[in-house]
Image (spheres, rainbow, N blue to C red):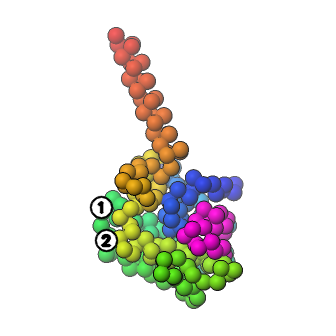
Amino acid sequence: MAVAWTKHRFSGGLLVLDTTNTVVLRGDPARMFDRFEDTAEIARFASAAEGFRSAELGGRRLSFQASEAAAGRVVALREAADRLFRAAAAEGSVQTGELPELLRACAACLDGSAERIGPDGLPSGDPSQPIRFEAALAVSALALLADRAWEKVRICPNCNWLFVDRSRNASRLWCDMSVCGNRSKAKRHYERRKVAEKEAVDA
Ligand SMILES: [Zn+2]
């Protein structure tokens, strides 16, 4: 069934993190699944990202020429980015040993790209031309690596997604308060009720 690429699925706040979050429930082998398993979803994801990541893309459109090789490059970058930024969020530092794989994946995605990056770090090419999704993804990953931007990457304690915390006091806990925050609140409420019922029985 086709994925509905809703706002919630772009809770990462950056193209590269939204892409890492196309694997759902990472770290839970029994339940995790990959929304890019059907490679047709990559183009649909890119098309939705044009709207949700419009600021990061400088309003440019994205194009994705679907092929097995192109899907392989996207997934390789996604997995290298997830490993590196997840470890950076958990440990507060970047492991240099994780860099070659991410940089190689970025190089593969940027091969033959004619894009330019402006002083604001955004793609600055011809606004009437779409950016190749692979190139935009690599630019997003490299921007997150630069200037310690990765310091703001967090891991959602409910769903394990990665997101960038832009809150003023760096206190954002959930990828999406309306989904994971509420689920957690509901769970706490349920547990409190169970304890209360047990106490009532024991009394
Ligand atoms: Zn979450």
Q: Is residue 39 visible?
A: no
Q: Which residue is mark 2?
A: 95
Image coords of residue 48 (percent x, y)? 65, 63
**For the residues bearing labels 2 and 1, Cβ distance under 8 angstroms:** yes
Q: Which residue is the extreme one toward the top?
A: 203
Q: Which residue is mark 1?
A: 91
Q: Nearer the viewer, residue 122 or 11?
A: 122
Residue at image point 57% right, 68% down: 55
Name the mark on residue 169. none
- Residue 57 within the magenta-colored segment of the rendering: yes
Q: Give the structural element (helix, strand or loop) at label 2.
A: loop
Instruction: State whether residue 179 is above or below residue 11.
Output: above
Mark 2–mark 1 distance (CA, rounded to whole Å): 9 Å
- Residue drawn where x is 46% and y is 29% of the image: 190
Residue depicted at 36% across the width and 61% down the height: 89
Amino acid at the residue labelled 1: Glu
Quick check: can you spot residue 129?
A: yes
Q: Answer few, some or many: residues within 10 Å of disc 1's Cα (few below 14, many 20 plus, some between 14 and 19).
A: few
Instruction: Label 1, secondary structure: give it.
Output: helix
Occupied quadrant, residue 51: bottom right
Query: Closest to the observer: 10 or 98?
Result: 10
Left or right position of 82 against 4? left
Indicate whether residue 79 is drawn in magenta: no
The magenta region covers 43-63
The number of numbered badges drawn on the structure is: 2
Q: Nearer the viewer, residue 192 or 104?
A: 192
